[in-house]
Amino acid sequence: MTGRHRDGMPYAAVYRRVWDGPARAEAERIDRAWADWTVLYSLGRRCFYAMAAWGGPRPVIVEDVTGEGLEERMREAEMIKAVRSSAAPVRGGASRRRGGPSVVAVAEEPGGETVSAGGRSPGGRAA
């Protein structure tokens, strides 16, 4: 029971305030809609956060100030994951340019870091 009291005095009911109720409800809705993500709303920063549940070398966390923006960032992160998992090295020399690096897939992580798969020159030395 929530209330204020002192020894010997009866309980007094206290109004319980719910901060940012609509935003918290939106975070719960997004959390139920996206099974591979855990969605939170930060009262202190007034921002939505989503953490991916799939495994990887680094955790994937995206954020946005609106629920719609967060869902868009989540879609982008899933597309990057799909591109990375489907990228395979190119075999054979016909498609490579001489002396240039052969890049199989280039993707930008939600944090703005550009990641490329494959980055070796045809001679086997690092580009």
Image (cartoon, rainbow, N blue to C red):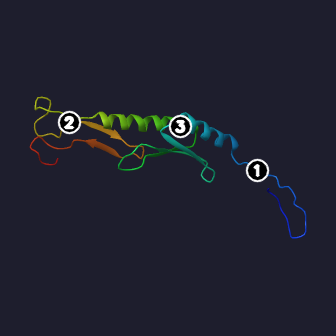
Q: Residue flagged by tag 3: what amino acid is it?
A: Gly
Q: What residue is disc 2 on?
A: 89
Q: Residue at x 22, y 38 (%)?
A: 103
Q: What residue is disc 3 on?
A: 69
In the rendering, at what x and y percent does residue 119 appear? 20, 43
- In this picture, is 10 found above or below 44? below
Which marked residue is nearer to the observer: mark 3 or mark 2? 2
Q: What residue is disc 1 on?
A: 17
Q: Residue at x 60, y 41 (%)?
A: 27
Q: CA distance from mark 3 to mark 2?
A: 33 Å
Which marked residue is nearer to the observer: mark 1 or mark 3? 1
Q: Quadrant of the N terminus?
A: bottom right
Q: Quadrant of residue 33?
A: top right
Q: Residue flagged by tag 2: what amino acid is it?
A: Pro
| Label whose residue precedes the other's in the sequence (1 or 2) | 1
Crowdedness near tag 2: few (<14), some (14–19) or many (≥20) residues, C-alpha within 10 Å: few
In the rendering, at what x and y percent does residue 96 appear? 14, 33
35 sits to left or right of 120: right
Q: Nearer the viewer, residue 54 or 69?
A: 54
93 sits to left or right of 40: left
Q: Residue flagged by tag 1: what amino acid is it?
A: Arg
Q: CA distance from mark 1 to mark 2?
A: 56 Å
In what element is the residue under mark 2?
Answer: loop
Q: Nearer the viewer, residue 34 or 89?
A: 34
In the rendering, at what x and y percent does residue 90 appear? 18, 33
Q: Residue at x 27, y 35 (%)?
A: 87
In what element is the residue under mark 1?
Answer: loop
